[in-house]
Image (tube, rainbow, N blue to C red):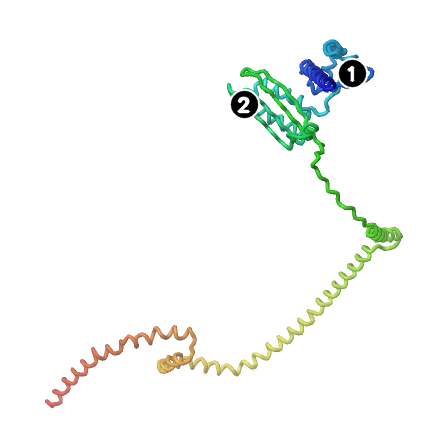
Amino acid sequence: MIEKDFVTEGLKRTRIDEYLENELERAGYGGMEIQVTPLGTMVVVYAERPGMVIGRGGKTVRNITQQLKNNYDLENPQVEVKEVDVPELNPKIMAHKIAAMLQRGMHFRRVAYTALRRIMGAGAQGVEVTISGKIRGSRSACAKFIDGYIKKCGEPATRFVREGFATVQLKPGVLGIYVRIMPPGTVLPDKVDIIQPVVEETPVETVVEEETSAPVEEEKAEEPGEESISDVLEEETAEEIEDIEEIEEEAASEKPAEEEAAEKESVKESKEEPAEKKPAKPEKEAAEKKPAEKPAEEPAKEEPKKEKPKRGRPKKEEPKAEKPEEEKPKKRGRPKKEPAAEEPKKTFKTAELVKPAGDKK
């Protein structure tokens, strides 16, 4: 039966893989491929350190070929060794590295996270590391660490996702390490690429090229003897600066003449002023004498001034100075108390004294 042939071939491949894994564990075994040819069977071994697979003078390679021919019934086996380009993207190599780190006594979480960082740093799309066994104590447990995007089921999971497995013997028991890596550059069937339509803009490009080429040709046509635009602009600015300086000098020369005329006029006015001021002296003396006479008349003139600001709108300064001195005593009634208490008594006493004196005479 054809089905039995497939099963027997699959068992043969797994046995060869286990043998090579145990034999080349220190060399960083990363998998193998079997290709059947008319000349014989080609076994391609992937390793991190191919020198250890070959051995001194090819001793280990010859030993492996002999074992494959005798124990696994391969016709004319030929072993070829290839180096792994990126070991971090090979799940079998990473699983064996995690097992070696756990065997040294490192904590499983620290080991898992370091492996995740290394794999994602190499450019993988997604990683899943599973460590199962007696990791915390006497009871077995399973710790799963995931990073990135990885497929779990369906055809993409079997086609694109690479898997690796390794075991470690520790004091509590055996631990199993299972690593799944989704390599970079995998195109999933559900990926959709949106292609933008191409817009042809040939006429616009030609016009732009003509406009840009025109000034280049003009620059080339200029001879070395001719003046450039920048030189002409510099000359014009220099001429404008000279004109401005000349105008400022003329204005400065005109100012002294005007100042001299103004000084002459001021001198003439100063000469005329003393002649006019001499007859005004007697007027000043009269004005000075008048204020000397005013203090006698001030008490008579102060009373009408007090009434005027009440009817009109007086200045704020005058009423403030006059009201507290004269008006307050009138309102409080001080003048009424004095005549009632002192004056009538004096008058009565004088009358009493005068009358009897007149009668006696």
> As drawn, is 288 to the left or to the right of 45?
left
Q: Earlier in the sequence, mark 1 or mark 2?
A: 1
- Residue 135 — which label? none
Left or right? Give the position of 279 relative to 340: right
Question: For the C terminus, which image quadrant?
Answer: bottom left
Q: Is residue 26 visible?
A: no
User: Which of these two is toward me, 124 or 230?
Assistant: 124
Residue in view at x 77 percent, y 19 percent = 35
Which residue is nearer to you in this view: 43 or 6? Answer: 6
Which residue is depicted at the point 76% across and 17% down? 43
* Residue at position x 52%, y 83% in the image: 279
The reply to whether discs 1 and 2 touch (Cβ–Cβ < 8 Å) is no
Which residue occupies the extreme front position in the image?
A: 1
Vertically, is 247 above or below 31?
below
**Quadrant of the drawing holding the N terminus:** top right
Compared across the picture, whether 351 is left or right of 1 comes to: left
Q: Amino acid at mark 1?
A: Thr
Where's residue 354, x and y in %? 15, 86
Callout 2: helix, strand or loop? strand
Distance in Å between CA atoms under marks 1 and 2:
43 Å
Image-based side of 153 in relation to 40, left or right: left
Residue carrying label 1: 41
Residue indicated by mark 2: 141
- Give, as a three-letter code, the residue at label 2: Ala
x, y percent for residue 235? 80, 58
Spot occupied by residue 347 in the image (x, y as percentages of width and height): 19, 83
Mark 1 residue crowding within 10 angstroms, few (<14) / some (14–19) / many (20+):
some
The residue depicted at 27 percent of the width and 76 percent of the height is: 333
- Using the rendered image of the protein, determine whether residue 103 is visible from the camera's viewpoint: yes
Figure label count: 2
Q: Position of residue 316 (x, y in %)?
A: 42, 73
